[in-house]
Image (cartoon, rainbow, N blue to C red):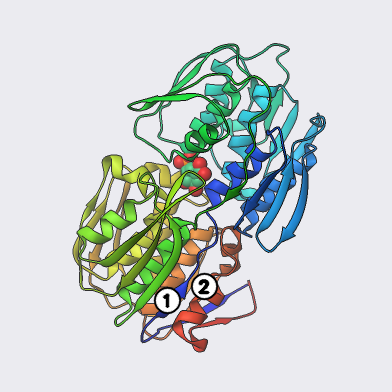
Amino acid sequence: MTHIVSQTPRLLGTVRPPGDKSLAHRALIFGALSDCPVTVRRLPDGEDVRSTRDCLARLGADFVDLGPGAVRVRAPMRWSRGQHLDCGNSGTTTRLLAGVLAGLGIPTVLDGDPSLRRRPMRRVAGPLAELGADVSTGPDGRLPLQVGDPGHRLRGGHVVLAVASAQVKSAVLLAGLNAAGPVAVTEPALSRDHTERMLGGFGVELVRDGLTITLYPHEGRLQGRDLDLPGDISTAAFFLVAASIVPGSEVALQGVGINPTRTGLLDVLRVMGGRVDVLARGDVAGEPVADLHVASAPLRATVLRGDLIPRLIDEIPVIAVLATQAEGTTVVRDATELRFKESDRITATVRELRKLGADVRELEDGLEVTGPTPLTGARVRADGDHRLAMALAVAGLVADGETVIDGADVAAVSHPGIWDDLRRIGGRGVVRTGGGR
Ligand code: S3P
């Protein structure tokens, strides 16, 4: 399916982003490991979270819908063995469930769509095997992942990760819940810490020391608690950038999670001269939440590298769009991880933004964008990547004429409502649905 985005004079209004996708996966999985039914509210309706729910249901967990965005999850009476699980497009579903199932020793095969099948899985199988788990990847270290029953509890240990990956860190911690001793994980830079925070709220003992987190095994099920999820800052990002670059815009974003491991974009916007106000609102589900107000502003280029990268890893395609409208050359380095996301996000972002006339260059570990450049509407493609689809939609708001995005409905992986949200704050004509691919 194609979506057509027109240049828009300005964006005005309020958006309530869907609940955080990363937190939603964890809330459902932890609910299925809990000693009582757990109600989750503001659950996003994207396909990735649906994949986690469907996989857990296949494994025996029970779900009851309580109304829009509200679901109650109950642990399986008995975990179903020998399932062949379809994780769809979702790396988080695959890697977190691999950790849970490896720790419990439940034989399972994890597989997914063509995009997920291209993504590296040794990074999760290797660390789990270090704890004595029976996990193997398919050919070339990719899917399908085979989890077996090693016939004994996993051993405690200290796993040192080569990449800052919250998915791999989480898999190791979840496997450690039933291990015979404490499990420590050290990462090269701090990735999002939602698993640690939420496990703590569910009664698990964890201790952080710099970049090392140690989990002490937990006897029996987790102490279930109901969760109201904060809004997803990675979805809010598209509106933050759009309102920053469409002249005359003012947009409010309600109830957005501002966990410091996720707020790199807010820091970057400030450095670039963006106008963002953060109106703190307190804590939800153990996570800080705020309303964000953003208005358009003249922007200047900046350099993004090092420890900042994991704090905005999912936002880099839309940051590249932001940089096309900033004065000077914005440089993104230390971001090789982007090549292993839903698409090779370095190559795909550079290729598609060039079609719109952006001055952008590919680097081995990132990209460079020189601006400000007037963009021109063109035919682009989402490459099976939800975040690229939405970044291109944001570019289309400032590009002269019309931007036709082929395969744009892949946005439904995280935010099917993006097109309605853009129509509401940009005017009815700003987005049309075309036919075709
Ligand atoms: C996620 C971790 C990140 C991120 C992904 C969600 C998570 O992936 O890019 O969108 O929920 O833990 P990596 O762990 O591969 O860095």
- At 67% from the left and 57% from the top, the residue drawn is 70
- At 51% from the left and 15% from the top, the residue drawn is 182
Pick the residue in front: 255 or 261: 255
Q: Amino acid at mark 2?
A: Ile
The reply, left or right, for residue 3 in relation to residue 324 is right
The reply, left or right, for residue 396 in relation to residue 126 is left
Disc 2 versus disc 1: nearer the observer: 1
Q: From the Cβ of disc 2, is ligand 1 less than 8 Å away?
A: no
Q: Are marks 2 and 1 in contact (CB under 8 Å)?
A: yes
Q: Which residue is mark 2?
A: 405
Residue 371 visible (yes or no): yes
Quarter of the rendering occupied by the C terminus: bottom right
Residue 332, image x, y percentages: 28, 51
**Label 2 SS:** strand
Name which quarter of the figure residue 351 lies in: bottom left
Residue 352, image x, y percentages: 42, 65
Which label was assigned to residue 396?
A: 1
Quarter of the rendering occupied by the N terminus: bottom right
Residue 19, image x, y percentages: 55, 57
**Label 1 SS:** helix
Q: From the Cβ of disc 1, is ligand 1 less than 8 Å away?
A: no
Residue 117 visible (yes or no): no
- At 65% from the left and 60% from the top, the residue drawn is 69
